[in-house]
Amino acid sequence: MRCRGIWVQRYPTEPFENELDSDSQYPDARNEDLLIEVKKQRLLYSKFSEPYMSELVYLIAARERYKGFLCILQRYGDGCPRLVLAADISLLWLTHQSYPTVYAGDMEIEDINRKVVGVWEKVKEEELEATRKLWESIYNQPYEKAGGQVAMDLGEVVSVKPPVYWEVSNCDVNTKYKSMMPRFLLEVCVHVRLNPMKVMQEDMKKKFLRLRIVRCHRELKMDKPFSSFSSDSWEKTWHLYCEFGTKGVVLDLRLRGGRCFKGSSSKDMVAVLWNDLLRSPSLTLESKVDEQVRVVVSITPPAQAPYLFKCVPDRVTDDSGAMISDVVLRMNSYRPQEGRWLSRTVLDHAGRECFVVRMRVAGGFWRRGGETPSAVKREDRIIEIREGSWSYLAGTIGRLPEKVVGTATPKEPPDHQKSAWCFSTGDELTIHWDLSSSTAGLNFSLQNQTCPDSLQVKLLKGRKMQYQAKKFNSQKEKAKQNMNNGQEVDEEDDDDDEGFVTLVRFTEENPTGRATALLNWKLLVVELLPEEDAVLALLLCISILKSVSEMRKEDVGSLLIRRRLKEAKQGTRDWGSVVLHPSCSSGISLPHLQPWHWNAMAVTAASNGTDNFTKQPAFTYSPVEGGDKLYKRGIIA
């Protein structure tokens, strides 16, 4: 209807509907052709929705490939099966067609539509193979590349959905938070081909190629045996998504049997950097490793990706924002510290401290052997979020940042099965729990008092829309995956979505809803699009966890931990820095390289491979901090 209104305003003399002549016995054939074409391309936008496709450097590279494809069509189009269009070539072909007069003048190929397979059509395997071989024989380069894959639909075998949600965001509402740094992703494809003149056959079984990252994620080592490569064609060996901060990839040719029997030694290596690839007009670089292996690395331009945050336990603070510690007592001439707040530090994808969340538990003064602490009333157990990082005074002892950017205040619920919160953002959160069930009985409602439209935003339990997790074909496959991840197998475990909440917004542009954030309130992990407010998402996460703990009368998300737990050292395993495409078989035994919401516990695990929550360290807390009873009264009473 909106489209109709715009059309009528701009073209008042032209009808909006392309109506057929109802009195005619035979409809206009041109209209029939148009209808067929529209039906065929009705899902076309979804094929080109990636944000990097509007970048000039991508379009320049795609134009050169399109020219090369037209040359192949003119020269070989009649003597081979239909040629399959890659995504970047399809984009330029359709763009060319959108200028029909120019297109008709440029094209000397008759009946081109019958000679190519578009991205909206089913692909025959022999057509795809013929296209690949023809391209390789003429240009000596792999046909597919990053951002230029073939949309596979081989009969019943449907293309694998990309593991990252990548769509253009019109704005980033989080630029107001100076502590937040945007996250950029690029798609990477690595193709390998052997040089038949240089390969030594006797070393084939001992040699393998290893892929590593230049910066970040030192644990990442993906190996591929030499025997799996071919000298006849290019093989897409690795397909992954990397943050721009990883700098590039390192390809290391190694020989088994190094210093120890099970080890290996490096024979030659080459580093391919993102900046060098971006300077290449084709976004592609070819390298040789030890003259035996030819490697082609291609990327897409980096595009802004969703933010990633996780909350980690930290020390108890007082009302002034200082950590409870002898260091602070000495600095204050042993004046008692007033008030007790639980703290959680919010780390981004790169391990930077962006916010500090804290929850008020108790009030009053304490000193060693002095007054007895007491929990505050429920209505005073507020949550606040401060922007920035700790100001460290000595070691890990510090003070909170000063700027408060968000608060949540408990509201008296209508009955004991509900919990309610008022946010400083103007939103009100209501949580209802059906006592007859576990957390599956939870229901959430978020209402903005300034915009009371009930359809403006919804909180949906579980992973919905683009966050829907990978489905297993069978219970046996799921059990196998769990064993690979080091988890106990539960044949009847159906609680994969427990702790997940999807935030969906409804607008005029998206009347059916658009998921803008995914929360896991049990693990305190958040993924959000740039258009979603980070403070609102964090307030939701903490408020839900605190409410569920209170309603269930148990510490559901380990809120009683009052120490900073040991995290993986930055650069060892950086969650979200590398995500493997499902088509990359190397990712089967690397669950931490999956999207975090596919296997949240494995991806957000601590450096020792265990999660921070199910295996808590045995902490001893000083009397000044207060004992477990105090915090239980302040959390689950």
Image: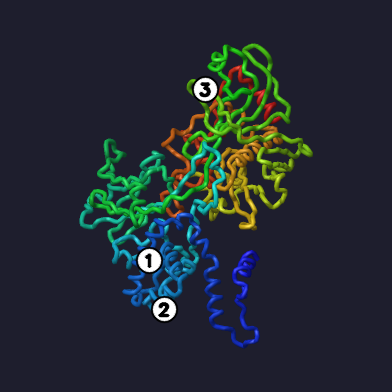
Quadrant (top left/top right/bottom left/bottom right) for the N terminus: bottom right
Residue 378 on image: x %, y %: 73, 30
Front-most of 311 and 33? Answer: 33
Going from N to C along the chain, the mark reached first, 1 or 2, is 1
Helix or strand or loop: what does disc 3 sit on? Answer: strand
Residue 58: quadrant of the picture: bottom left
295 with respect to 544 (left or right): left
Q: Is residue 299 above or below residue 69?
A: above
Q: Earlier in the sequence, mark 3 or mark 2?
A: 2
Label 1, secondary structure: give it.
helix
Q: Amino acid at mark 1?
A: Tyr
Would residue 152 be found to the left or right of residue 532 on screen?
left
Proximity of marks 3 and 2: CB atoms separated by less than 8 Å? no
Q: Which mark is residue 66?
A: 1
Q: What amino acid is labelled 3 in the image?
A: Ile
Identify which residue, 212 or 381, lies in the foreground: 381
Task: Residue under label 3, please give it.
Answer: 397
Q: Residue 495's x, y, as percent?
A: 61, 45
In the rendered image, which quarter is residue 524 located in?
A: top right
